[in-house]
């Protein structure tokens, strides 16, 4: 079917033999990807060190591959657009659970007071001193 297409609908691409191995990602002998676009080869011609491909630009397969790559990137958390949004969202959620770290120490004093110190505050709390019941409760 492609062989009978109007030549005006085809794209002529020229590559060196080395470029066909490095710049093209081959699906099979009659189809390749170049610069993110899929092409089906209708005819080829070798002139010196150059290879000319007359191709049909497969727009539908190109779009399908882009969607597939996007879905795979999302599945493996490698989508750059979504990664930045996710990091902002995680930072927002994290702010509910964690605060900035601060340097404080709990130091018991001799008068049953506990002193909490940090760079901004000095708070003294009286410790609750509870004695066990005397005599201990009897087991029944």
Image (tube, helix red, strand yellow):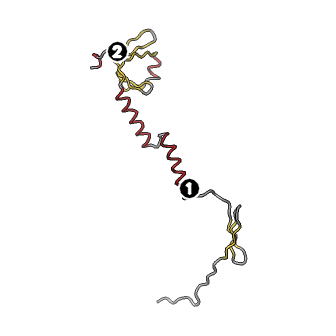
Residue 114: where, in percent of width, then height? 68, 73
Real-space Cα distance between discs 2 and 1?
60 Å
What number is the disc on residue 124?
A: none
Tell me if residue 27 comes above or below residue 81 in the rendering. above
Going by the picture, which residue comes out furthest to the right?
110
Badge 1 crowding class, 10 Å Cα cut-off, few under 14, some 14 to 19, many 20 or more, is few
Ranked by sequence position, the earlier of labels 2 and 1 is 2
Residue 92: where, in percent of width, then height? 53, 52
Tell me if residue 54 comes above or below residue 100 in the rendering. above
Horizontal side, residue 46 vs residue 121: left or right: left
Image quarter where the N terminus lies is top left
Going by the picture, which residue comes out furthest to the top?
48
Residue 26: where, in percent of width, then height? 39, 25
Horizontal side, residue 27 vs residue 138: left or right: left
- The residue sitting at 37% across, 16% down in the picture is 54
Element assignment for label 1: helix
Residue 136 picture quarter = bottom right
Residue 21 picture quarter = top left
- The residue sitting at 50% across, 43% down in the picture is 83
Badge 2 crowding class, 10 Å Cα cut-off, few under 14, some 14 to 19, many 20 or more, is few
- The residue sitting at 49% across, 40% down in the picture is 81
Mark 2 vs 1: CB contact within 8 A: no
Nearer to us in this view, 121 or 61 = 121
Residue 56: where, in percent of width, then height? 35, 20
Tell me if residue 116 comes above or below residue 77 in the rendering. below
Q: How many marks?
A: 2
Residue 27 picture quarter = top left
The residue where tag 2 is placed is 8
Element assignment for label 2: helix
- The residue sitting at 59% across, 84% down in the picture is 132
The residue where tag 1 is placed is 95
Horizontal side, residue 106 vs residue 81: left or right: right
């Amino acid at each position: 079917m492609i062989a009978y297409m109007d030549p005006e609908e085809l794209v002529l691409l020229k590559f060196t033999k080395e470029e066909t191995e490095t710049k093209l990602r081959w699906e099979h002998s009659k189809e390749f990807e170049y610069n993110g676009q899929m092409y089906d080869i209708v005819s080829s011609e070798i002139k010196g060190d150059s290879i000319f491909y007359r191709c049909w630009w497969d727009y539908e397969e190109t779009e399908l591959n882009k969607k597939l790559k996007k879905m795979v990137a999302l599945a493996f958390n490698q989508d750059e657009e979504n990664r930045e949004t996710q990091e902002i969202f995680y930072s927002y959620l994290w702010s509910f659970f964690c605060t900035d770290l601060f340097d404080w120490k709990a130091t018991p004093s001799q008068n049953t007071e506990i002193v909490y110190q940090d760079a901004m505050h000095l708070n003294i709390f009286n410790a609750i001193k509870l004695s066990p019941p005397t005599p201990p409760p009897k087991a029944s």
